[in-house]
Image (cartoon, helix red, strand yellow):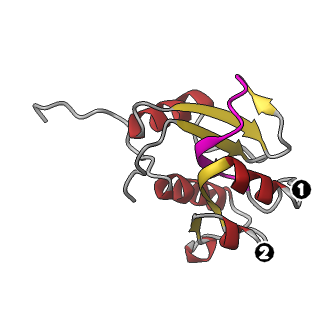
């Protein structure tokens, strides 16, 4: 999917099960897709990882799944704090309040396999405009 315009602040909510990329690699991929941006990370419980970012951000990426502990009001709070939100279709409210939603029903992998989580997170990152291949191609290629 195409990158979103005018993104300078990105907040990523990380799942409890783990993430596809390490935080450093994910930060590089976000920076490659949105060169003028700064990224901040937090757990599903709201605990900040690393530097605390500003309250309001341009892009919110929610990588959490079914097994992640989130309060009922976290969706509403996230909607208020982010200009654009990308996430998975977990629960009743996300489809309604998120701008771009990755539909996990299109995955043809058993739900209890680790591949399910990897493909779901990769799908959310693609919807957010973050490229899977962050290597810069040289002009000579």
Say left or right for 54 vs 121: right
Say which quarter of the image contains residue 26: top right
In whole angstroms, how far apart are the C-alphas of marks 2 and 1?
Answer: 13 Å
Q: Residue at x 46, y 36 (%)?
A: 29
Q: Secondary structure at mark 1?
A: loop
Residue drawn 13% across and 36% down?
141
Q: Position of residue 30 (x, y in %)?
A: 48, 37
Residue 64 position (above or below residue 93):
above
Note whether 14 is above or below 25 in the view shown. Answer: below
Residue beneath disc 2: 92
Q: Residues within 10 Å of mark 1 (few under 14, many from 20)?
A: few
Tell me, yes or no, whether the highlighted magenta stretch contains residue 141: no
Is the stretch drawn in magenta largely helix, strand or loop?
A: loop
- Position of 54 compared to 86: left or right? right
Above or below for 110 versus 73 = below
Residue 43 in percent (x, y) is at 78, 40
State the extent of the magenta-drawn residues as a range.
50-64
Q: Is residue 31 above or below residue 95?
A: above
Tell whether position 59 is magenta: yes
For mark 1, what is the residue? 71
Question: As rendered, which of 79 and 90 lies closer to the eye?
Answer: 79
């Amino acid at each position: 999917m195409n990158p979103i315009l005018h993104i300078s602040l990105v907040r990523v909510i990380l799942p409890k099960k783990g993430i596809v990329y390490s935080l450093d690699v994910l930060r590089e991929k976000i920076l490659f897709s949105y060169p003028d941006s700064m990224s901040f990370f937090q757990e599903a419980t709201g605990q900040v990882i690393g530097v605390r970012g500003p309250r309001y951000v341009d892009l919110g990426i929610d990588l959490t799944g079914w097994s992640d502990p989130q309060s009922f009001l976290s969706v509403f709070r996230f909607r208020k704090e982010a200009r654009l939100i990308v996430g998975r279709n977990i629960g009743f409210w996300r489809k309604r309040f998120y701008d771009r939603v990755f539909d996990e029903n299109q995955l043809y992998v058993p739900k209890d396999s680790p591949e399910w989580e990897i493909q779901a997170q990769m799908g959310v990152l693609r919807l957010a405009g973050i490229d899977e291949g962050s290597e810069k191609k040289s002009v000579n290629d």
